[in-house]
Amino acid sequence: MLFHRARTTSSRFAASALLASLLLPLGCTAMRQPRPQRPNVIVLFVDDLGWRDVGCYGQDVASTPNIDRLAGQGMRFLQAYAANPVCSPTRAALMTGKYPARVDINDWIPGTSFPKAQMLPPADLDALPLAEVTLAEALRAQGYKTWHVGKWHLGGEGFLPQDQGFEVNWMGRHTGHPASHFFPYGNDAAGEPAHSHAVVPLPPGGKPGDYLADVQAETAAGLIRGAVGSEQPFFLYLPFYAVHTPIEAKTADVTHHRELRQARLAAVPASERETLQERGPKPPFAAMLENLDHAVGTVLDALASSGLADDTLVIFTSDNGGLSGVSENRPLRGGKRSRWEGGIRGPLIVRWPAVIAPGTTSDLPVITQDVHRAVRSAGGADSDTAVREDAFDLLPVWHGAPAAEHRPLYWHFPQHQTAEVGPRGAMRDGDWKLIEDFASDTVMLYNLANDPGETADLTQQQPERAQRMREQLRAWRQRVGAKMPTWNPAFEPAQPAATPKR
């Protein structure tokens, strides 16, 4: 799919300039007053990290001291959601501050095909349109340096980070995940080239044994150290390729977790071992989580040693729920690609020493595009009408103000989850969540306060509420221009006669 540029953009990517940048000298409480200057901003965006994959959210197998320390120094959101159950749409929401359905990116790019499934998805964009104002463009207009280090996955040539407001781009291209997390990253496990999953452009000096999350963190740390003494604030977007498949970690760490797991199993009665085997991340993933945490620590240490920590807003979150069979999403139902809570819930940690009281938590339900709007506010950039409609400004919450009254949250996924599970939409209004199945024209209703695992469908007990929420969800789809799936003529048995309603 091709796009016409909506505005003129000059090339801002030159290898020599990038190298020069890298190698520069090395719950809510009482309101606190912010420092007068605009903060530096770092967004640590993790791929496929489930809502309880780190220690401060309840994971007790892998050790994540750096991420846990970040939470202890800032605010941890207990009901944070990704804008979509897969990556590219959520990344679009973070960059634009809008619902993915409004941006017209509803599946990962280029998407999963189910040609014989019951329904066919609508046409989806394969790149973030240049007409959209990205977070990088909004902050750059306010005088920020803008750096991208990691996974982009919002388009290829002509739609890369350097075309969307970033002055520096390391490792950002159309690639959704590396062939390997070990150098040279574009090779598969057998060492054969897999160029469709290459990671470029890479900083110089790579060597066998290098781990991608480490390289991302060290590259980011170099940029941070180079900003010391500058009066110009920076925006560092660090979207990790971890912890997306392939599930790979450093050999010594995997071995350590295999030994730990064997010891844990040996310490319980035989009757309990089968249950224990299903609990917690398996050794390769547990080690990968620890490798990620080490990379986060590298960035936080660079901030501290550079004297920039107090002046920097750090945000840690993920692009969708954890992958079923890899992440342990219990007690939530489902995983990545589903509209169940396990597919869309994730961590959100925010540290801003000048503003946020340490060790606080918030029960406010929030969603990806809220981060966009709050960062723009912190950086002095106004949000347009669509962003104000789609995103809540979290800045007052970070300052310690009481949370505003709840507002509904919405999800639109007009693709099949699997060949058998069809397109669905969802919304949350207070404690209530509705899932609408487009193929069967039915809904499911859950009370998340009493049933976070979505085990008891209350549609029959609450028919008026279910109907009201369904109408609300359909009205939202109309407002944002959400595209709907259609019946597949190749599906057997014969297609239904009606077209699903918006």
Image: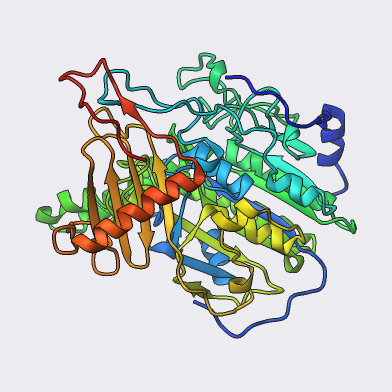
Asked whether 352 or 4 is in front, the reply is 4
Residue 75 locus on image (x, y percent): 55, 70
Residue 216 locus on image (x, y percent): 65, 40
Q: Is residue 432 left or right of residue 167?
A: left
Is 470 placed above or below 243 here?
A: below
What residue do we see at 56% from left, 46% from top? 93
Outermost residue toward the bottom in this view: 30
Screen quadrant of the N terminus: top right
Q: Is residue 78 left or right of residue 175?
A: left
Residue 120 locus on image (x, y percent): 34, 25
What residue do we see at 39% from left, 34% from top? 484
Q: Report how many numbered discs are placed on residues in the image.
A: 0
Q: Determine if residue 453 is in view.
A: no
Residue 231 locus on image (x, y percent): 90, 59
Outermost residue toward the front in this view: 498
What residue do we see at 48% from left, 72% from top? 362
Q: Is residue 42 left or right of residue 102?
A: right
Is 163 placed above or below 387 here?
A: above
Screen quadrant of the C terminus: top left
Asked whether 102 or 342 is in front, the reply is 102
Asked whether 214 or 455 is in front, the reply is 455
What residue do we see at 80% from left, 31% from top? 9
Q: Determine if residue 168 is in view.
A: yes
Outermost residue toward the left in this view: 271
